[in-house]
């Protein structure tokens, strides 16, 4: 009978690069990785946000470095990669957490679909789609040289079921899911079967970006949109950042060594619920 190893987990001393590491969701991922002994390079457009996370990790006895980097600027990312390699010598894990939406690319009673500015739509596409592809080019090339590594992209429920009001964000996240599948096959066939690429698709998590859309800032009560989301979420709550950690750790650890090219929903059952 084949030996079954039930203790596969992330190797302490592994090196993870997290883009958008200063954000609400990725901050929690960074802290969880550091708790397991992973060396974390926290990349964020805001140097202060990156340093805040790295400082918290170091204060807890972990090892981290903060790097200000722009996921849409290849030169910025290449400089960041060189900084990581100079300190840690390798890159084992890449989490592409940078992303987001923009009010100007969102429909509303004041702004119809026909009036969405192309530059706002392009901004959302660039941040979410190119902001995933370019880091994969830079840090993925290092994984090719090592012949191993794990890439985890952040898609969205919007990629499975496009939501009202956010056409650009929904389409951009669908592109991230599609690219995840493409890159998984490309890496395995062209370079190494030991380079895996997957994604998670978070459902609805309260962040600073969407809080005003889902709750009344003054009262804390749900908006009609927030209530509609919970009505269609069987678990009847929004996600908490810690709810992502288990799935993230599984996908970047040897426990998922035969998993590549998948997009895993973490959504409280939203995608499964038909409404009846």
Image (spheres, rainbow, N blue to C red):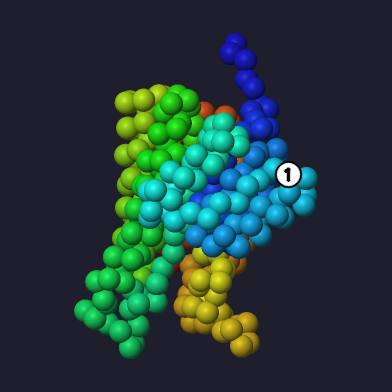
From the top left corner, tell me how far across and down residue 29 is, in percent: 61, 50
Callout 1: few (<14), some (14-19), or many (20+) C-alpha neighbours within 10 Å?
some
Q: Note whether 243 is above or below 253 in the view shown.
A: below
Q: Note whether 220 is above or below 61 in the view shown.
A: below
Q: In the shown orientation, is residue 194 left or right of residue 238?
A: left
Q: To which quarter of the image does residue 187 belong?
A: top left
Q: How many marks?
A: 1
User: Hey, which residue is sitting farthest left in the picture?
Assistant: 114
From the top left corner, tell me how far across and down residue 222 is, in percent: 56, 80
Q: Note whether 113 is above or below 268 in the view shown.
A: below
Q: In the shown orientation, is residue 3 left or right of residue 114?
A: right
Q: Nearer the viewer, residue 153 or 213?
A: 153
Q: Which corner quadrant holds the N terminus?
A: top right
Mark yes or no: residue 246 visible: no
From the top left corner, tell me how far across and down residue 170 is, in percent: 35, 63
From the top left corner, tell me how far across and down residue 59 is, in percent: 77, 52
Query: What residue sits 41% from the left and 28% below the top?
Result: 144
Residue placed under numbered mark 1 in the picture: 62
Q: In the shown orientation, is residue 119 left or right of residue 2?
A: left
Q: Which corner quadrant holds the C terminus?
A: bottom left
Mark yes or no: residue 228 visible: yes
Q: Give the SS element for disc 1.
A: loop
Q: To which quarter of the image does residue 84 belong?
A: top right
Q: Note whether 98 is above or below 1 in the view shown.
A: below
Query: What residue sits 33% from the left and 45% below the top?
Result: 179
Query: What residue sits 33% from the left and 25% below the top?
Result: 189
């Amino acid at each position: 009978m084949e030996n079954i190893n039930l203790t596969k987990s992330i190797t302490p001393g592994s090196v993870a690069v997290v883009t958008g590491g200063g954000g609400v969701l990725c901050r929690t991922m960074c802290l969880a990785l550091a708790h397991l002994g992973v060396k974390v390079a926290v990349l964020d457009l805001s140097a202060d946000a990156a340093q805040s996370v790295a400082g918290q990790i170091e204060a807890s006895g972990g090892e981290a470095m903060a790097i200000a980097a722009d996921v849409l600027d290849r030169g910025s990312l290449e400089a960041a990669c060189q900084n990581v390699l100079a300190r840690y010598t390798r890159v084992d894990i890449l989490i592409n957490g940078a992303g987001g939406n923009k009010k100007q690319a969102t429909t509303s009673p004041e702004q119809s679909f026909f009036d969405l500015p192309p530059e706002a739509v392009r901004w959302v596409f660039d941040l979410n789609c190119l902001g995933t592809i370019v880091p994969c080019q830079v840090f993925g090339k290092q994984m090719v040289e090592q012949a191993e590594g794990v890439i985890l992209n952040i898609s969205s429920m919007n990629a499975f079921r496009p939501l009202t009001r956010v056409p650009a964000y929904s389409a951009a996240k669908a592109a991230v899911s599609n690219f995840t599948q493409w890159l998984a096959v490309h890496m395995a066939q062209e370079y190494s079967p030991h380079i895996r690429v997957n994604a998670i698709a978070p459902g609805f998590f309260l962040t600073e970006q969407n809080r005003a859309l889902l709750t009344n800032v003054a009262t804390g009560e749900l908006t009609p949109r927030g209530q509609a989301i919970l009505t269609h979420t069987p678990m009847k709550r929004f996600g908490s950042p810690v709810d992502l950690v288990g799935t993230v750790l599984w996908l970047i650890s040897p426990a998922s060594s035969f998993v590549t090219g998948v997009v895993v929903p973490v959504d409280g059952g939203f995608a499964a619920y038909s409404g009846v």
